[in-house]
Image (tube, grey):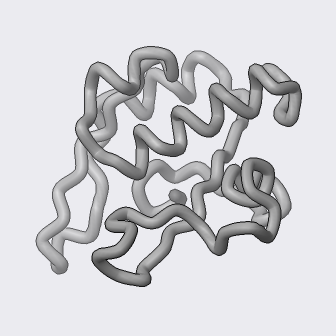
């Protein structure tokens, strides 16, 4: 996260969506259930930032150039994320976040 945005976080600030949703029933989510045994854990990091900090992140170019990464940050309201990406990890995390918030397992931010 820090590499892409400059935002620092402590591991204690991460909310493990997978743990909250499933406990120890599943190790994580399976991007290809039955196709492979790889699993992913989904986390959310929430932080209040000042408007100036947020504006400074808009369009920021990040990533490791020596590894061929060119990342342009796009800032948008969380509820609009589904409109902007087909990424299954992001969409799964968004769904779990919304479901866990609705169930009262995560406080509204």
Q: How many marks?
A: 0
The furthest residue to the bottom:
37
Tell me which residue sits at (17%, 78%) in the image.
Answer: 66
Tell me which residue sits at (37%, 63%) in the image.
Answer: 31
Image: 29 above or below 57: below
For the question of whether residue 109 can be seen, the reply is no
> With 57 as the anchor, is 60 left or right in this view?
left
> With 46 as the anchor, is 84 left or right in this view?
left
Q: For residue 60, which quarter of the picture?
A: top left
Quarter in which the C terminus is drawn: top right
Q: Position of residue 16 (x, y in %)?
A: 73, 56
Q: Position of residue 6 (x, y in %)?
A: 51, 52
Q: Position of residue 18 (x, y in %)?
A: 68, 57
Q: Position of residue 26 (x, y in %)?
A: 67, 69
Residue nearer the viewer, 72 or 33: 33
Image: 59 above or below 22: above
For the question of whether residue 82 can be seen, the reply is yes
Tell me which residue sits at (29%, 20%) in the image.
Answer: 83
Residue nearer the viewer, 76 or 16: 16
> With 73 as the anchor, is 21 left or right in this view?
right
Tell me which residue sits at (61%, 39%) in the image.
Answer: 96
């Amino acid at each position: 996260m820090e590499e892409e945005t400059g935002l620092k976080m402590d591991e204690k600030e991460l909310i493990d969506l997978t743990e909250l949703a499933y406990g120890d029933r599943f190790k994580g989510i399976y991007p290809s259930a039955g196709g492979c045994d790889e699993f992913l854990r989904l986390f959310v990091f929430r932080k209040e930032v000042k408007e100036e900090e947020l504006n400074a992140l808009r369009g920021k170019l990040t990533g490791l150039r020596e590894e061929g990464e060119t990342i342009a940050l796009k800032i948008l309201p969380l509820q609009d994320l589904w409109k902007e990406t087909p990424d299954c990890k992001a969409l799964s995390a968004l769904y779990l976040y919304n479901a866990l918030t609705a169930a009262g397992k995560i406080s509204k931010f």
